[in-house]
Image: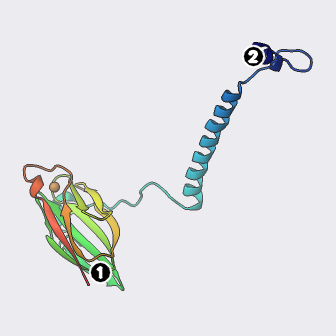
Amino acid sequence: MKKQTEKECENSKGEKAMHLHKFEKIWLIFGIGILIIFLAVVGVGAFAMGHQPASNIKTIDPEKVAETAPFNNPGLVHIKGNKYELNLVAEAFSYTPNTIQIPKDAEVTINVATKDVVHGFSIAGTNVNMMVEPGYVSSYTQTFSKTGEFLVLCNEYCGAGHHLMMAKVEVTE
Ligand SMILES: [Cu+2]
C-alpha cells in the first residue's frame, strides 16, 4: 500500500508531485460543488426571480394607531372579486375586531398594527403567523379555502393577560 502511494506521487520525470488522496478529492469536489449550487440558488433567486430583502416596510406612529387609516376603522374590507383586506389592531390584551367573518375562498391581505407592546398574530391551522411590532404594520396574504372557525392567538408574551389574548376567524360559504 505504501509503495503504491509513493509511486503515484512521482510524475514521469521522477519528481515529487502534489498528491491528493482519493477521499480528499471526493470531499473537495463535494464541498466546492455544494458552494457552487448554493451560490447558483441565491443568484437565480436574486437576479432571475427578483427576490430581495424586505423593502418598502410600512411604518406607523404607535401612539396614533387609533387615528391612522385604515386602523381607525378596523375590519374586513372588500377590494374586488375575491380580494379582501383585513385591518386589525392589537393591544394588551385584545384584537379589534375580535370576531372576523370571511367568505370562503377569499384572498385576504391581513394588516396588523399594535398600540403598545410586541404582540403576535397567528391563525391556528393556517400559515398566518406574524410578529406585530410597535411602529410597524405586519402584513400577510392568505387564501381561506376551508370553512370553519379558526382561533387567533398572540404568541409573543405581552404581559399578565397574554394567555387571554385571542380572537376568532369564521370562514363561511
Ligand atoms: Cu399579545
Vertical side of 37 occupied by 168: above or below: below
Residue hosting label 1: 104
Residue 30 sits in which quadrant?
top right
Q: Is residue 100 left or right of residue 5?
A: left
Q: Position of residue 8 (x, y in %)?
A: 81, 20
CA neighbours of label 1 inside 10 A, class few (<14), some (14 to 19), many (20+): some
- Please identify, in this view, whether the residue under mark 2 or under mark 1 is nearer the observer: 2
Mark 2 vs mark 1, CA separation in Å: 72 Å
Q: Which mark is residue 1?
A: 2
Residue at the left extreme? 160
Which quadrant is the N terminus positioned in? top right
The amino acid type, in three-letter code, at marker 2 is: Met
Q: Where is residue 54 in the image (x, y as percent from the top left)?
A: 41, 56
Q: In what element is the residue under mark 1?
A: loop
Q: Which residue is drawn at 36% across and 86% down?
A: 81
Determine the quadrant in which ligand 1 lies.
bottom left
Vertical side of 82 occupied by 165: above or below: above
Q: Which residue is drawn at 14% across and 62% down?
A: 166
